[in-house]
Image (cartoon, rainbow, N blue to C red):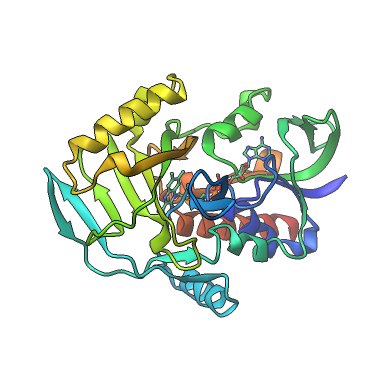
Amino acid sequence: MRELVIIGAGVAGLAAGQELEQLKPLVLEKSRGLGGRLHSRTLKSAIEGPNTITADIGAQYFTARHDSFLTQVKQWQQQGVLTLWQGQIASWHQAKISHSSPEKRWVGLPKMQQITKLMAKGLDVQLSSLVTSCLWLADQECWQIELNQGSTLLTRRLLLACPLDQAQALLANNADEHSPPDWPAPMQPCLCFVIASKHPLTLDFDGLFVNDQPIAWMARNNSKPGREPHELWVIHLSSQASKQLINLNNPQRWQQLWLWLKQLELPIDWQDFQEIDCHLWRYARPADQRQQLFMEHQASNLWLAGDWLAGGRVEGAWLSGKSSSQAILDHFNG
Ligand SMILES: Cc1cc2nc3c(=O)[nH]c(=O)nc-3n(C[C@H](O)[C@H](O)[C@H](O)COP(=O)(O)OP(=O)(O)OC[C@H]3O[C@@H](n4cnc5c(N)ncnc54)[C@H](O)[C@@H]3O)c2cc1C
């Protein structure tokens, strides 16, 4: 029997795991890599030159405001896995572009998920391990964890550090009294597109927040330190536009994207661009803004952490993981 199982090797799960070494936690992660939505994807290059290119398709950068996270960010910077993105950030409103005030925007080096590799050091992380259900066995006072490989394991304590909807699904077979009563609204999707141009663009912005449009954000990936020099742009749709395209096939999604891009009337010739990748983040952002940091259900030794409890950003995910670990330690120490 395990003392603690953590489900999810994103920022929240790993931040918690680091503090809980004495419980020798097992971290189960369904993907082949660490980092969750902090993700730079290596893509087969359709452009001349490199065989592969890397695009930041999830979190674009992160900020640090809380003292403890600032300290952590400085450490990561010294360890060489994080650096500042000095790109020019602007916002679009009714076809007018205005520049945003400077802010420290951090990116992983050379990939967004680089920090999670450091966080996972010394932890027992099992990748490619999709958990399919978690059942509280009241008579044995432990959780029964089912994995898709057909194996089962038992643990005294459980920390779910995955997006809200995935956590809810894992607990679905439990009686109501064994899972938290007040779930927030489901998370919102985000469709992400990656496009490339053979020609470098001359623009006075590297990142653009777009207001009140189907396109919510676009960024020049190659303006970030450590990325390949090719003109590569990452585009995120708003939650509403993502929902609109969610059931379409990829050619239909691309067709709509080009129409929406043209509507922005940017000084860009979209014909120079090639379609590189389209990725759906089904659980991208929380719908509600809670500031609860973590949830716990002490009667069944259950904790929940993740960005959806703490503002929907990398800093929130980290703070959520850390504070849940404190609660778990208090429980362990009686
Ligand atoms: C498109 C997009 C843009 C974003 N932009 C920004 C930004 O610019 N700045 C910012 O600060 N934040 C941004 N974010 C948010 C940021 O990425 C998240 O807040 C943060 O990465 C969440 O970390 P987490 O650990 O809470 O969750 P996740 O990163 O989602 O980690 C959860 C992990 O649990 C795993 N998992 C889920 N279910 C199971 C299961 N059944 N079995 C095993 N493993 C499971 C998942 O594979 C995942 O690795 C963005 C997110 C998206 C999607």
Name the residue at 38% across, 63% down.
Answer: 223
Name the residue at 54% across, 52% down.
Answer: 53
Q: Residue furthest right?
A: 1
Which quadrant of the rendered structure holds the N terminus? top right
- Identify the image quadrant of residue 327: bottom right
Residue 192 at x, y = what percent?
A: 42, 39
Mark count: 0
Q: Residue furthest front?
A: 48
Q: Is residue 73 above or below residue 48?
A: below
Q: Nearer the viewer, residue 331 or 257?
A: 257
Horizontally, residue 307 falls left or right of residue 88, namely: right
Q: Nearer the viewer, residue 190 or 18?
A: 190
Is residue 119 at least partly visible in the picture? yes
Residue 266 at x, y = what percent?
A: 19, 46
Is residue 289 at least partly visible in the picture? no
- Identify the image quadrant of residue 128: top right
Horizontally, residue 177 falls left or right of residue 136, namely: left
Q: Nearer the viewer, residue 145 or 332?
A: 145
Horizontally, residue 292 falls left or right of residue 324, namely: left
Residue 265 at x, y = what percent?
A: 16, 42
Name the residue at 31% across, 69% down.
Answer: 103
Residue 190 at x, y = what percent?
A: 41, 36
Q: Is residue 295 above or below residue 106?
A: above
Name the residue at 22% across, 67% down.
Answer: 101
Q: Is residue 47 above or below residue 88?
A: above
